[in-house]
Amino acid sequence: MIFQALRIALRSLRINKLRTALTMLGIMIGVGAVIAMVSVGAGAQIRVAEQIQSLGSNLIIVMPGSRNTAGLRLGQGSQITITEDDAQAIAREVPTVQVAASTSRGTAQVVYGNLNWSTTINGVSADFLEARDWGLDAGRPILREDVDGATKVALVGQTTALNLFGESDPVGEIIRIKKVPFAVIGVLSRKGQTTWGQDQDDIVMIPLSTAKKKVLGVSQANSRSVNVISIKVQAGEDMSEAEAQIRTLLRDRHRLQPYQEDDFWIRNLAEVLQTQEEASAVLTYLLAAIASVSLLVGGIGIMNIMLVSVTERTREIGLRMAVGARARDILTQFLVEAVTLSLIGGIIGILVGIGGSNVISALAEWRTVLAPSSIVVAFGFAAAIGIFFGFYPARKASRLDPIEALRYE
């Protein structure tokens, strides 16, 4: 029965090819738009996740707090409150912490031969690369002996290496930072930009002790102070619990009373990742909802055309009923026609959506991710549209009076 109705439906659709094509156009555009927009949103989600993860997995950042001067709050980082000793205590006393790396940073002009480049200078402890999950493309990392001995060695980021050395190998070359010579011992792997647009590869890393003694200087208030502590939590551990333990430890070390605010600032990047992913998911749903409007418009088009078809084929319906066709048979025939329109439009729409995603990726240089689930949902939605908007015309056809239908002109 269904196969016979399908054959009749296809024959009917072939009779009016242009009308059939125009009717399917709404479904084609709707399905294609849903797939393309969802792939754009999914690409945005993955891109955000990659940017956050490039900062380091399971990472917690501790930075100096703010201070008040004559009633003025000078903002985060204005008070020197965290030290190398804090980092060592965190690594030693918080059981879920894998490493805690200290960093002092500044900017300086780096010179190589007759070339120079202004970049970020990071004085780092020996476990900084482990804390940030940062690899090397060449050379060796900064070792504990380099920090203990304040050696004049440096790691260069990809952007800095390109601007100073071009395509040549920097390892073993001598650069000057504030007129102090440093031997390049390694080239950092590419990290890319952060979510706020900072180029992480535009950097030179030197031992923390060397940075304080020869390049960046030390705070007169506390020679052990640092700008950032990067903390890597062991895989599988609760980041929120680790953050709470770190806060408790630092408050104890800084002798803060319960009524006093923290004199440091903690940022859990797992929470940043979750927030960014939620925002990207909302964007994806919004894009999909907007694109779905086209599907509804296409469904209304199907209903309109099917109503016209019922009117045009009233005598045919009457004749079929006169020779024994039941109301259920007429209902099935017109419903199959509507669903067939939707499914054919949906199949073409899937191809349009996949092609559109590739075009967006190529022209806009925007990463897109085709999710099989979005294709299945869009196709299923197209079928549902056919059933929903095709039911009323099919029901109307099935309820025609055979005698009146045969008399229809």
Image: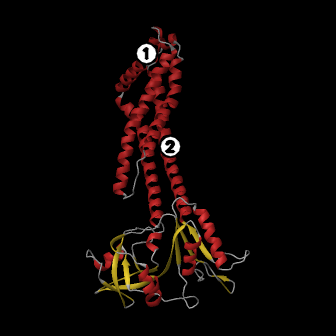
105 on left or right of 249? left
60 on left or right of 379? right
Q: Quadrant of residue 93?
A: bottom right
- Local SS, label 2: helix
Residue under numbered circle 2: 293
The percent position of residue 250, horizontal first and vertical second, equals 63, 75
Give neighbour class at mark 1: few <14, some 14-19, many 20+ (Cα, 10 Å): some
Disc 2 marks which amino acid?
A: Val
Q: Nearer the viewer, residue 171 or 310?
A: 171
The percent position of residue 236, horizontal first and vertical second, equals 53, 58
Which residue: 43% across, 17% down?
A: 1
Q: Give residue 154's mark.
A: none
Which residue: 43% across, 50% down?
A: 39
- Local SS, label 1: helix
Which quadrant: the C terminus?
top left
Q: Nearer the viewer, residue 172 or 119?
A: 172
243 on left or right of 374? right
Disc 1 marks which amino acid?
A: Glu
Residue at mark 2 to residue at mark 1: CA–CA distance = 34 Å
**2 or 1: tag closer to the N-terminus:** 2
